[in-house]
Image: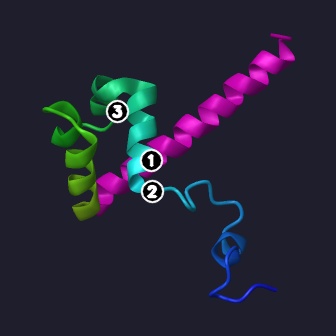
Amino acid sequence: MTQAGEPGAAAAKQPRNPLHGLTLEAIVTALAAHYGWAGLGERIPVRCFTSDPSVASSLKFLRKTPWAREKVESLYLFMLREERRQQAASRTRGE
């Protein structure tokens, strides 16, 4: 059994949490790469995604705004589910 100070202790507490260990910066960067800033702004209509968007301005806003951060995290989880579904569908079709 790992102790709280040992490496791997935190990962053992949340083995099925896909957000565990990810930084908010990594999540925002992945969403912007996947949807683009315009697509991200359509899905979550906040100014940090629609008006002169950048990772830095988004992080500043999201760290201060819990409801917006929850929406971003939910969209990230949705994106992961969709990617898994597409991979599973392509495997069943033999692609």
Q: Marks 3/2: CA distance?
A: 21 Å
Image location of residue 73, percent across then percent down? 45, 50
In this rendering, position of residue 86 left or right of residue 33: right
Which residue is tagged 2? 23
Q: Marks 3/1: CA distance?
A: 18 Å
Q: Are marks 2 and 1 in contact (CB under 8 Å)?
A: yes
Location of residue 65 with respect to 35 vertically, above or below = below
For mark 1, does the 10 Å Cα neighbourhood hold few (<14), some (14 to 19), or many (20 or more) residues? few
Magenta-colored stretch includes residue 8 = no
Image location of residue 61, percent across then percent down? 21, 54
- Magenta range: 66-95
Q: Quadrant of the C terminus?
A: top right
Q: Which is the main secondary structure of the residues drawn in magenta?
A: helix
Query: What is the three-letter code of the residue carrying label 1?
Result: Ala
Residue at x 67%, y 83% (from the top left corner) = 6
Q: Marks 2/1: CA distance?
A: 5 Å
- Mark 3 or mark 1: name the one nearer the start of the chain: 1
Q: Nearer the viewer, mark 3 or mark 1?
A: 1
Which residue is tagged 3? 43
Q: Secondary structure at mark 3?
A: helix
Location of residue 37 with respect to 2 vertically, above or below = above
The part of the image, by quadrant, that contains residue 67 is bottom left
Query: What is the three-letter code of the residue carrying label 2?
Result: Thr
Which residue is tagged 1? 26
Magenta-colored stretch includes residue 75 = yes
